[in-house]
Image (cartoon, rainbow, N blue to C red):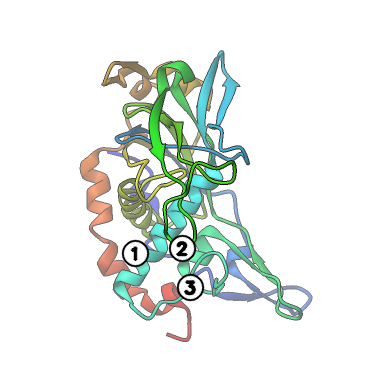
Amino acid sequence: MNRVLPTLQEFQDFGARFQTASGEKLERVYLRNNRFVAIIGYKVLKDFARFTSHEDLSMDVLEYHGKTRIYLTGLKRRAVYRRASEAILRQYDVEYNCATPDHQCMQCYNCFAYGGVIAIKNETKAIKSRIKTTTSFSVQNDEESIIDEPEFHNMIHRNLRMAEETEEKKASIYEMVLIRPGVVFPFIDIIFNPARFDIAMYCETVRRADAEGYGSRSSLLGTMETKIVAITDDLKVSQTELLDAIKVEGIRVDDHQFISLFGPDELVSREELETVRMELPALIEKNRKLIYGREK
C-alpha cells in the first residue's frame, strides 16, 4: 500500500487569510511549505500527434541523454490539465465561469492549484502554480518516432471558390510530420502543499486530458494513455533514470525495471488511485464554497 495517500489531509482552504506581522492579510496559497508529493509514471501515445513550439511548425526535438528525442513541454501539458480541470469543475456547477487565460477569478480551486495573474491597475494579483509538470522526453529517438504523412490541400478564396493555379494561391501537396502512436513519455509531476482532493482531481484531470489530446491540433490528435507507477514525498529519481529504466519493443512496453526504481510503499496500484478518484464528487459537494470561490 502506498504510504503517502493515507497521510494527506482531505482538503486545504488556500483562500484562508492570515495576518502578517505588518498587519496585512495574506492568503494561505502564498504560504508554501516544503511538503510535496511527486507523481511518477509514463504516457503512451495512442494516436498520431504533433508537438511544436516553433514559428516554422517544426517538431519539438532535442538532443537529450544520448538521443535526439521528442519533447512535450511541462507548460503545454499543464495547460491541457488546467483546461480539463476547469471542465470538471464546470460539470459540477454550470455557473462556474473561471476560464483560462483571460477570465481567471483568482479565488477558485483551479487558480489556487494552477496559478494565475491579474494585471489590472490597483487590482494586481499573482498566484504561483502549486502543480509543477516537468518536460517529458520520448523513450524512442526521433527517427523511430516521427513519420511523414502526405496531405493534399486546395487553397480556397474568401468567396469560397476554388483557387486557380496562380502564384498567389494554388493547390498544394505537403508532408505532415507526425509522431507515431506507441511513443512513450515518462513524466514526473509535483504537487506542493498537497491534499487528498488534489490527488482525486489530478486523477480525473489526467483521464480527461488524455482523451482530449496534447500538442498542436489536439482536438483531433495526441490522445494518450497514462500509467501512474508511484507517488512519493521523497523524490530520488531523475528524468534520465526513468528513460534508462523503461524499454519499448514494437508496441510492447517493458516497465519492470522502471517499477523497480521505487520502494514498495511508494508504488501505487490502479485500484488505490481509482478509490481516490471516485471520492471526487463527494469532496466537491462537501467543500463547494471553497472550491468555487467564497461568494458561492
User: Quick one: 152 or 108, which is closer to the camera?
Assistant: 152
Residue 20 left/right relative to 295: right
In three-dimensional space, the C-alpha distance between marks 3 and 2, rounded to whole angstroms, equals 38 Å
Crowding near the residue tagged with mark 2, few <14, some 14–19, many ≥20 C-alpha atoms within 10 Å = few
Image position of 180 (left or right of 277): right
Q: Position of residue 206 (x, y in %)?
A: 35, 49
Name the residue nearer the viewer: 48 or 284: 48
Q: Secondary structure at mark 2?
A: loop
Q: Position of residue 24 (x, y in %)?
A: 73, 78
Whether residue 104 is visible, yes or no, is yes
Q: Which residue is disc 2 drawn over? A: 159
Dot 1 falls on a residue whose secondary structure is helix
Q: CA distance from mark 3 to mark 1?
A: 12 Å
Disc 3 target residue: 98
Residue 123: horizontal and vertical position, in percent? 70, 79
Q: Which residue is mark 1?
A: 88
Residue at x 58% of width, y 21% of height: 64
Q: Secondary structure at mark 3?
A: loop
Q: Please tell me which of labels 3 and 2 falls first in the chain.
A: 3
What residue type is disc 2 on?
Answer: Asn
Measured from the top left, where is residue 160 in percent x and y? 42, 60
